[in-house]
Image (cartoon, rainbow, N blue to C red):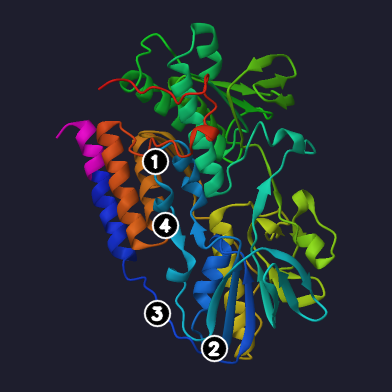
Amino acid sequence: MKRSQAAPALLAALAGTALLLSARRGTAPRQQRRRAGCRVVVVGAGFGGLHAALRLAGKPGVDLTVIDAHNHHLFQPLLYQVATAALAPSDIASPLRGTIPADGSTRVLMGSVTGIDTASRHVAWDGGSVPYDELIIATGSTPSYFGHDDWARAAPGLKTLDDALHLRRRILMAFERASRAGSAERGRLLTFVLIGGGPTGVEMAGSIAELAHDLLRHDYDMPDAKARIVLIEAGDRVLPEFAPDLSQNAADALGQLGVDIRTGTRVTGIEEGVVHLHDETLAVETVIWTAGTAATPVADWLGVKPGHGGRVPVGADLSVAGHPEVRIIGDASLAKDAQGKPLPGLAPVAKQQGCYAADAILRRLRRGRAPAPFAYRDYGTLATIGRGRAVAEFGRVHLTGEVAWLLWAVAHIFFLIGFRNRVMVSAQWAFAYATRQRTDRVIIGGPAAWPALSGQPPVAKPG
């Protein structure tokens, strides 16, 4: 078997194993009657909130309410693949009402929280007010522009499906417009700047580079055109969360894909079509912000002083000082490890915190002993750069290349929510690896959403 055929075959086999191991997860039938019990409210259904809700749903004595601004759980680590046409939105999103096992004591509300009254123990949201005896806040984070909020319009972030679809339209429209532009304008249209060299920036830069290579070769009559992808990082290396040798490996892999990496570079201004650096000005069509995040306004809701990045300091049991019934998990919390170092804003941290918070509530209901302080178990960190390119860090064990990429792929398939999502993502990745085609190159939106060069929509290449 050829190497190009072996990788997708091995991926399919490993993914199948992950699917079989996780296929038993199901949902319970819904009932209309709600039973009285300890009123537990979970705000936010990201990784932390969802795993807390899954732990609490259907438990005796628990009256559970989950509030989220969306009706779905989003697998954010793969959001960039929606933005670069590798996956469809439904591949990484799962309806909450079909995901959380429910009986008469569980309900899901779609709405936005506007405040929390800790004195009366009520959560205010745009649909009214919900009382609680125990509260878990898992509202995550939003893009932070470090005091330059005016940059957001020209440099959107990537946090929601709406963000991903907006960026996908913007990226694909850049190629459509370039196909009918003159050579000078074409260079600007095919310039993509990503600000922030963390995992999201690195993974998206690699994905755009591969997308550009495949599109320019197959979809458009632009044989001499070349996309320019610039990754800007203020620090001295990309992937600073990883060991230096893995950061260098990732930088080398991006270089092989043609990505222009600018480390030690500071952005001084962003306008429509222009990025100002401390030593240069770039004319650009698409700017993507992957540099930083800030916590949602939980501190304001609770009336407490926020810590770094707007995160709320919590105790060893993840509760807020003076309010043992309120726990904050995930990106909104400033939790520390045994050495006093803040825990990173990663999905595995949020998932483990969600399970811990739910177990602490169940212990209290059973009048059991107080739980031991929360301790994060680090099972390793992975990041992908492109097809067959990835880095993986498991303590002293460092992996790169196709082995790391296969591990990355199987881990992400396994942790997706929903059997259908695992099947679809496995199939999409195997197909894309074997054919170098992305099936979701769909521009959504009418002519008003097209930043075309004229009033008419772009003309597709014949054939």
Residue 242 lies in what quarter of the image? Answer: top right
Q: Nearer the viewer, residue 147 or 124?
A: 124
Provide the residue designation for mark 3: 28
Q: Amino acid at mark 2?
A: Arg
Does the magenta segment cover residue 283? no
Q: Is residue 338 left or right of residue 258?
A: right
Vertical side of 440 occupied by 41: above or below: below
Mark closer to the observer (2, 1): 2
Q: Amino acid at mark 1?
A: Ala
**Which stretch is magenta?**
1-9
Q: Gap in Å between the C-alphas at discs 2 and 1? A: 47 Å
Vertical side of 97 occupied by 445: above or below: above
In terms of secondary structure, where does tag 4 sit? loop
Mark closer to the observer (1, 3): 3
Our reading of the magenta stretch's main secondary structure is helix
Residue at figure coordinates x 74%, y 68% from the top left: 315
In terms of secondary structure, where does tag 1 sit? helix
Provide the residue designation for mark 2: 34
Task: Tell me if label 1 and label 3 are in contact, CB under 8 Å.
Answer: no
Q: Amino acid at mark 3?
A: Ala
Residue at figure coordinates x 44%, y 14% from the top left: 180
Q: Position of residue 161 (x, y in %)?
A: 52, 48
Provide the residue designation for mark 4: 416
In terms of secondary structure, where does tag 2 sit? loop
